[in-house]
Amino acid sequence: NTYALFAETISQITAASGRAGFIVPTGIATDDSTKAYFASLAQNARLVSLYSFENEEFIFPSVHHAFKFCILTIGHSEQAEFVYFARQPEQIYDTRRRFGLTPNEFRLINPNSLTCPVFRSKRDAELSKKIYRAAPVLIEEGNPNGNPWGISFMTMLHMSGDSHLFHTAPAAQRLPLYEAKIIHQFDHRWSTYQGDSGRDVTVNEKNEPSFTCTPRYWVDASEVEQRLIDKSWSRDWLMGWRDITNATNERTMISSVVPRVGVGHTMPLFMTNQKPHLAAALLGNFCALVLDFIARVKVGGTHLTYGYLKQLPVIPPDRYTEADLAFIVPRVLELTYTAHDLAAWAADLGYTGAPFPFDPDRRTTL
């Protein structure tokens, strides 16, 4: 796989006042292994254009239909032009598809990786730039003030590497082991196991506040406690998101609060040093449609990794006024506190009443 060396050789033999155009896999702009090369082009105003094609209509007849390649042009340019997901050469002239990015806009959207954001249209690109001008990335690496939420991450238990710790039956001093498929947005009881197979939890079951999901495995409480002590986490609830996702799913970013249980690696956890009311606002932001739009245009594969999450636009905690929190927090509370096992979460939000009914119509409105 020599295309990276091929591309670098061309960049070295091209005069400062000259231009070069060549065909390489689209990964030159999006892959982690070539991000330093692409960042050098983008940040030094050496990128003229990148027109990316899918081979679904066999521009190259002997190449696999799923292969993605691009026409990359380098030379001096203050703004680079892009087209993605083209299937025929003439589509690069469609003004609805073409969008431009300056070096500053690369840093605005992907400050950590400096890889190329992939937009399907000019409208998507312009809307994304507007969102990032309004809200910074969750964590900007290298900036001492770049983590305003005081976020830290953890994967508690690996489903393969820690499998020797798992039990197939509940017992005293054992906690359920949650997998990502158990949660959905504002919902810690999305699915449950019956034997070796999972199923969706019914609305009637969710309206029973004592109903809890049956996991596939249980784990000793001491294992969970040790891992949370190592992270200095004392709350009796956790927050996480689904690692496995896809831009073609109904929602790409799925996050929820769960009880203090065992959690598998497919649901990475995030901890914030902010107070619970702000943590509720952060969860609301993670489940917002606007953030999901950005996640859809950014996630290229089937995993929403830490790298993607850090570069999503998130409202910083100091932007929330008391009026904002008075509006947001009660709604997040009602959406999440539907069962007794999240009583500690409700208490931390100042609520000691009964769990809220699981009314799909009202939840949609909230």
Image: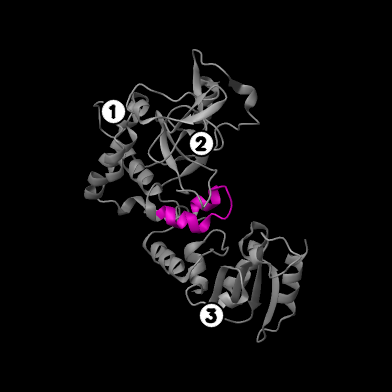
Mark 3–mark 1 contact, CB under 8 Å? no
* Residue 350, horizontal then vertical, whole percent: 25, 33
Q: Is residue 10 left or right of residue 207?
A: right
Magenta range is 291-310
Query: What is the CA distance from the residue labelled 2 to the residue labelled 1?
Result: 23 Å
User: Which residue is denoted by mark 3 in the rendering?
Assistant: 78
Quarter where residue 164 is shown: top right
- The residue at 65%/87% (across/down) is 17
Under circle 3, the secondary element is loop
Q: Disc 3 residue type?
A: Glu
User: If you read the primary sequence from the N terminus, does the residue marked by circle 2 or circle 3 appear first?
Assistant: 3
User: If you read the primary sequence from the N terminus, does the residue marked by circle 3 or circle 1 appear first?
Assistant: 3
Q: Is residue 2 left or right of residue 354?
A: right
User: Which residue is denoted by mark 2 in the rendering?
Assistant: 180
- Vertical relation: 28 (above or below) 183: below
User: If you read the primary sequence from the N terminus, does the residue marked by circle 2 or circle 1 appear first?
Assistant: 2
* Residue 186, horizontal then vertical, whole percent: 37, 39
User: Which residue is denoted by mark 1 in the rendering?
Assistant: 355
| Number of other residues with Cα within 10 Å of mark 1, as a class: few under 14, some 14 to 19, many 20 or more | many
